[in-house]
Amino acid sequence: MKNNIKILTILLSVSITTSMDFLYADSQNTESLNTIDILKDVIITNKTAANKTMSTVANKEPLNVRNTSGVGVEIGGKLDMQYGYNSVDKCFKIDGMSQCGLSSSSYSPKKIGNVTGLGTDTRFSLNIFKRTDSIDIFGAYLEIQADRDTKNVGRQSYIYINSKGGRIEIGNMDGASTNMQVSASTIALGTGGIDGDLRGWNNFKALIVGSNQLADNMFINKPRLPMNCVEKKQNRISYYTPQIYGLTLGFSYAPDPSDSPNKLGSITSVLSNNYYYVDLFDIGAKYERQIMNSVNFSTSLTTQFSRHNTQINTASYNDMFAYEIGAKFDIDAWSFAGSYANQNKSFCLKNETGKKDGNYYTLGTSYKYSDDLAFSLTYFYSLSQANAYQSNIIGVSASNNGENKSKIISIATEYLLVPGMKYYAELNHYNYKSDVVKRTNSSLKVIGNNGYTFLTGLRVQF
């Protein structure tokens, strides 16, 4: 009840505030920005330029507020109303399981079969900042989730300092590798294409014949470095350099990479075993340059490494080390992007032989037909092998050399109905399979999934 009252209070305050004549501020062109005095030296706007990706604004003022010691308040947010339909392979349907040697009585209908329905994604952000003579800008940023079934209301909360020497962030937020990433996912439209909302409709589980078990932690199913796949943001400190000749560097450190207990990798569920890693270093470098009048180029190299804590878990697993390199070209209305990431033998047992590095790559293009209409096409492929976070699956040992493969291809479009409101549609095809368990125990057979996820909806942003 208390949470509902808090959310209602926020909604009422936002609706009252946004009914005023707010002025938008473009972080790239802020020469003519005016402000509104609500109280003396208090400035309010609802454009979230102050919290754009740090790789693009690390050397720019977050907002061109007037030369005053007053407090600035930014209000932002979005409401996404979405319809989704997810089709699955016949073996993942109750009436088709017997054909695949599975007993349908072992599975809940809520966790298997085609899925259709409506969903929402509602977020609000508050950015309070102040300008001083010694520091350009300092402030605090808060982002909350306000959906009906939200378990964790807070998404990000941190303080920041912007100065000529760069930007410092301290709190609960994304790290350097997320903010500075360049890949096909960064140009995807709709819900995000290969890194979009399809995972809310598709559980990316494999079926294991012979154990009647759903295995949901066997695949790299997101185009992100391992620690960026955990559900909650890490508590960390970050520093971003000023942009010098197109180059920006970012450094983040989290002593405890995720909330208790530490869960790692491309894991979307809680496992019965804990594999603890500490001291996460998250580093990125991004270079941007205009080659010609209508051609822009950007590239990034991001990396993460974290130490396996043998004092908590005595098993001899490798430390985590992963990196991603990506590039993007913007040519007139077209954008082309791709990336390659390698997780090495992170989370695998030490001194193993025959293991392949876990890796993925992305490719994509987008086209802006007009100011209102745009399209994108993105592709994702990953490969991984048995490791620490699969040892709880029946028949799997971490020393197994079987392979897990996943593929996603996504087509998306967006249409601007009115300023601040977009219609979008997205069609995703996914295919994933594994022979990990099969190689460990010949009586077990792994069945991967193959199907489509269609998403469409309206998104309001302010």
Image (cartoon, helix red, strand yellow):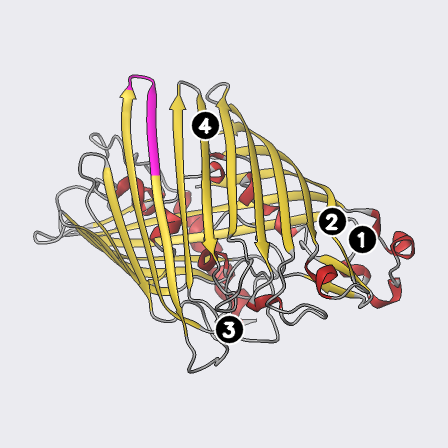
CA gap between label 3 and label 1 equals 30 Å
Cβ–Cβ under 8 Å for marks 2 and 1:
yes
Q: How many angstroms separate mark 3 from mark 4 (CA)?
A: 38 Å
Quarter-of-image position of residue 391: bottom right
**Tag 3: Cα neighbours inside 10 Å, few (<14), some, or many (≥20)?**
many
Give whichever of discs 2 and 4 has the lower sequence position: 4
Q: Secondary structure at mark 3?
A: loop
Secondary element type, mark 2 = strand
**Separation of residues labelled 2 and 4 (CA atoms):** 29 Å
Residue under numbered circle 4: 336
Q: Position of residue 226 (x, y in %)?
A: 47, 57
Residue hosting label 3 = 275
What residue lies at 30% left-to-right and 34% top-to-bottom? Answer: 26
Q: Residue most toward the left?
A: 133
The residue nearer to you, when weighing 367 against 388, is 388
Q: Sequence-wise, which precedes: disc 3 or disc 1?
A: 1
Q: CA distance from mark 2 to mark 1?
A: 7 Å
Q: Is residue 386 magenta?
A: no
Residue receiving disc 2: 449
Picture coordinates of residue 305 (x, y %)? 37, 61
Looking at the rendered image, the disc whose residue lies closer to the viewer, 3 or 4, is 3
Q: Is 436 rendered above or below residue 331?
A: below
